[in-house]
């Protein structure tokens, strides 16, 4: 327990990150100074955005430096504290990184109450994942009752929550996901009206069938060809929420971009980027709504929990981009 | 005076329209029935949107049919009337088409007062051109004082008005246009802060120099590579107005689309299509503002008037796409 195992970024990946892009390091467990506390990591969140953080480009957040512990949201337990607001035994979430132990001054740290919801929910539906779905759909997508809402990456962490919220708001919800099993999950377990399997089906034909009157709100997690295909089906005044582009994150060549963007002009539609961090002043509102919906069964959390050690992080991250996970992907840190 | 010369669409053009795509026809001048009036065309408006109307695709307006008189906004004089609201001698604008005479029931027809402004202004600054600039910039672009506003097709009919309005609203205005002469016009005659000649200069370098803090509002008339280049320079919360894409209208191959669209995500920016027809209930507001600005010299109308007959329409239209015109392009119909 006196050793802190860490995964650090070793090199800027080209395409899909390779084992050589990571450094596995063991350090002494740090001592928290006054006003700080030590967290032992129990769950590490794996998010598509991580891939962007590894690139040395100007973005909404600075890149992870070479040799730095990989940035990650995580949930852990306070094991030593010199901070007035956090006590030993508290469950907390924060950007603790891919390591067994982290020291924090409490900034950006939220408490997780296992009596209220399963701990993993605090990284998922009640964490940045749920808040991304909530603010992206409601504030940017502005769905109205009866609207057709299409979401890509629909079986993923954010997409599965978006679809369930949209359904609750009285929309017709069509999910796009990869594989028959994910599509079955969407329609049978999560109450989506329809699902399109982009691996086995023509997305264009699927949209014609399942969104015959066009798409009022498109919540995009994937980018690429699917975005382009949905753009061609927008209704007048449609809203496209650009939340992510997982199909592009490992691209080694410049991708062509959505050729059908002129559908925005023809339909007087809009395409707007969203980032959850902008909504920090309203997190409490979002979490309150999501907690109510979770309790009421409106939103069923979906997750893929992989048991392992922090050293398994690179391999688990790979699953995100190959589409092996359903719902929120989490690494449960044993040891 | 008893013959009505017309230009009709003869075929769906592939790429730049060719002479064979047009039919030149002579008909008898029609007699207006009760509730209608006859207009003799004096000026025909040439607009980039015309190219889209020739394609057989679902869009915001039905395509011009093969064999139909080419759709065009025009200004003319009432020469015979059985309509209570329009008298012989009135100057009027409307969608009269590429022909010497048109019959109208008055719908969509506006009066033009030559005592208030030069007649051509009613097709330009005081017509749909000016209204497009006004509502596109103000309602969709939402410029704030001190913003950097970039406009492409800046020496064109809409672009030149957009830039002048933005300047009046206290923005830093950078125009993108083709050729040194157009750029000189922008900075010397129209008071733009800077101009980038996309034919002679690297647009990216030009933006770094003239919009060093990034682009808050981009008013896009051209699409293609220029759109993509500007997207990479957006500021947080920037607004992109998709008004047109003249670089694409004659494309015979599918264009690649703006690869840098993920700048919308990184910058939480939006890209929104606009069409002037949606603002019809507010035309009076726009025209009042534009007329004031015209009278006060805030907006200097720019136009290229070509003298000819309706038969010259195809050749004049070509100028729009080769970039030969400055400001509003108008065919003055003699004969």
Image (tube, coloured by chain):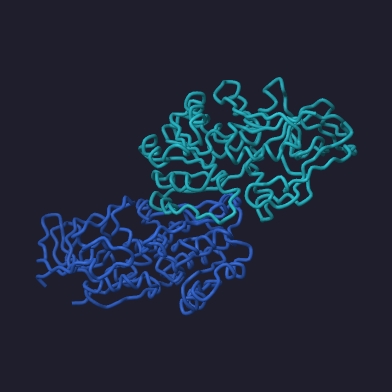
Chain colours: A cyan, B blue
Rendered image quadrant of residue B17: bottom left
Residue closest to the eye, B279 or B269: B269
* Relative to B297, A59 lies left or right: right
* Relative to B132, A188 lies left or right: right
Residue displayed at 45% across by 61% down = B223
* Relative to A4, A301 lies left or right: left
Asked if residue B115 can be seen in this view, the reply is no
Whether residue A299 is situated above or below residue B47 in the rendered picture? above
Whether residue B117 is situated above or below residue A120 in the rendered picture? below
Residue displayed at 71% across by 51% down = A63
Q: What percent of the width, then of the height, locates residue A200?
A: 45, 37
Whether residue A17 is situated above or below residue B323 in the rendered picture? above
Asked if residue A319 can be seen in this view, the reply is yes
Say how many tags the image has.
0
Q: What percent of the width, then of the height, locates residue A285?
A: 62, 33
Position of the N terminus of chain B by quadrant: bottom left
Residue closest to the eye, A181 or A133: A181
Position of the C terminus of chain B by quadrant: bottom left
């Amino acid at each position: 327990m006196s050793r802190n195992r860490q995964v650090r970024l070793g090199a800027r990946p080209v395409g899909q990150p390779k084992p050589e892009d990571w450094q596995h390091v063991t350090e002494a467990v740090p001592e928290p100074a006054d006003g700080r506390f030590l967290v032992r990591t129990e769950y590490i969140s794996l998010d598509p955005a991580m891939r962007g953080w590894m690139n040395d480009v100007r973005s909404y957040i600075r890149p992870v430096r070479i040799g730095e512990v990989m940035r990650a949201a995580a949930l852990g337990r306070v094991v030593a504290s010199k901070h007035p607001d956090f006590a030993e035994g508290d469950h907390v979430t924060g950007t603790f990184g891919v390591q067994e132990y982290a020291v924090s001054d409490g900034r950006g740290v939220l408490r997780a109450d296992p009596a209220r919801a399963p701990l993993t929910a605090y990284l998922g539906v009640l964490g940045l994942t749920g808040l991304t779905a909530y603010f992206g759909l409601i504030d940017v997508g502005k769905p109205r009752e009866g609207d057709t809402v299409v979401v890509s990456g629909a079986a993923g962490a954010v997409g599965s929550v978006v679809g369930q919220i949209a359904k609750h708001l009285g929309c017709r919800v069509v999910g796009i996901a990869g594989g028959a099993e994910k599509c079955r999950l969407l329609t049978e377990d999560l109450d989506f009206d329809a699902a399109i399997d982009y691996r086995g089906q023509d997305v264009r034909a699927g949209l014609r069938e399942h969104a015959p009157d066009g798409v009022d709100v498109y919540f995009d997690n994937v980018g690429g060809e699917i975005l382009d295909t949905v753009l061609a089906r927008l209704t007048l005044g449609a809203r496209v929420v650009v939340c992510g582009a997982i199909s592009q994150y490992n691209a080694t060549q410049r991708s062509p971009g959505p050729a059908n963007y002129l559908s925005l002009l023809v339909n007087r539609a809009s395409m707007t980027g969203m980032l959850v961090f902008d909504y920090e002043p309203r997190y409490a509102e979002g979490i309150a709504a999501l907690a109510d919906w979770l309790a009421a069964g409106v939103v069923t959390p979906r997750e893929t929990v992989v048991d392992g050690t922090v050293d398994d992080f690179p391999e688990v991250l790979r699953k995100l981009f190959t589409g092996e996970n359903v719902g929120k992907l989490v690494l449960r840190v044993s040891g």
